[in-house]
Image (tube, helix red, strand yellow):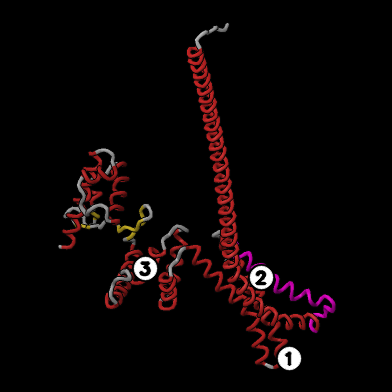
Amino acid sequence: MSATFYDRRAERQVAAAVADQHRADAAATLADVELRRVQVDSARAELLERQRAAADARKNEQRQTARAERTARWAGLRSTLGRVRAQFAAAVPVLVGAVAMGAPILIGWNGQLQTARVVLHLAGLAWVYPVALEGGAWWLAYLMHRAIAGNRPTGRLRVWMWLLALLAAGMNFWHGVTAYGPIGGAGLALSSLLGIGLWELTAGHARHAATGATARQARTTLTRWARFPLLSIAAVSIAATRGAGTDQEAAWQAGWTDRYGVGPDASRRDRRLARLIIRAQWESDREAARRGDLVIVSGVILRTLPDRRVSTPDDRTDTPVTPMNQQKLSVRGTALLERVRAAIVAGTLPETPSAKAITRQFGGRVQTAIEVREYLAGLHALTREEVA
């Protein structure tokens, strides 16, 4: 619907207002479009930022994964190099020992081979003889190594190993004497024994390492065998008699006590004096044993009760008066008396123990302990009278 104006001025004003309205609508539309463009640009920028952050995170994760893989590869390489180095370090002594022990075998091989050809006439099988001889010795050496590692006895293996080694050395000596003279024979024989000797030293070192013996203990043992061979043999015998769990130091102390009567801490003068005392006591004890003054009670050597003989006017014959005549013990008292006397000899009870001490150690009835105490008191009183 259009309005009809007859006033040109009013028409111009209305047209201007309409134009202003159109310009305002266009400006609003333009502002709306601009706002939407800014929103789209912001969303696009935010999306790009998220994509860039995700890409950076993926790259960072890939770098960390690559770094971890690289670190793991280097760690594996270092571990492998360490194992190779440790194996090489462990193999070097074995290789050196194999060369040191194998060289004498090669030197002595010819002597055994010539013995097999000339003496045994083995012809084409001659090479088997040195292989069997040396191989048997080294097989026994290997078994001895395993026995030492397992803490098992090695005496029989060592004996047979040295028998084979001495047999090989004898054949090498014969070949050396016939071919090069005595010096050559001795050289070949020693070369044959050198390998086994080196192995024996190696086995001894392994044995000390297995038992945990220190260098000081080894020197002490060697010094004892060199300085006191008889006492060392006595200590070994005592340890073998008492069992495998016997302490070596305790066996050594017992050996000194058996021989001198005193321990190794005593001075030389005391040891000499103690030996004289032991000899005198031995002679006295032998005489007492012949007279029947010594008895064995529960594995303990004890002296018999002293006798005293008195004469009465009515009876001219001597009658033995002993504490058994003065006081008769019961069966329990007799059994307890033997245990008490063994304890007195062992030093766990005094010479005149009280009834309380007897019951504390052996138990039983107090009346029986009192009976044994009175018996021992009478025995000591009789002994004092005999001495007076």
- Residue 310 is situated, as x and y percent measured from the top left of the image, at 19, 57
Q: Amino acid at mark 1?
A: Thr
Q: Quadrant of residue 177?
A: bottom right
Q: Label 2 amino acid?
A: Trp
* Disc 1 element: helix
Identify whether 381 is placed above or below 12: below
Q: Which residue is mark 2?
A: 138
Closest to the observer: 308 or 24?
Answer: 24
Residue 334 place in picture, x, y as percent: 30, 45
Identify the residue position indicated by label 3 in the image.
Answer: 258
Q: Nearer the viewer, residue 168 or 272?
A: 168
The residue under the point 27% across, 56% down is: 347
Left or right of 284: which side holds 182?
right
Front disc: 2 or 1: 2
Give the class, few, some or many, for how many residues have Cα within 10 Å of label 3's Cα (few <14, many ≥20): some
Asked if the residue under mark 1 is in contact with the one under mark 3, i.e. CB atoms within 8 Å, the reply is no
Q: Does the magenta run of residues contain 247?
A: no
Residue at x 63% of width, y 79% of height:
193
Of pointers 2 and 1, the one earlier in the residue sequence:
2
Identify the magenta region. Answer: 118-146
| Percent x, y of residue 326 | 21, 48
Task: Name which of mark 3 and mark 2 comes first in the sequence.
Answer: 2
Q: Residue at x 17, y 59 (%)?
A: 384
Eyeballing the image, is 53 above or below 139? above
Of residues 240 and 338, the one drawn nearer to the viewer in this rendering: 240
* SS state under label 3: helix
- Decide whether residue 136 is among the magenta residues: yes
The residue furthest right is: 124
**Looking at the rendered structure, which numbered label has been put on residue 343?**
none
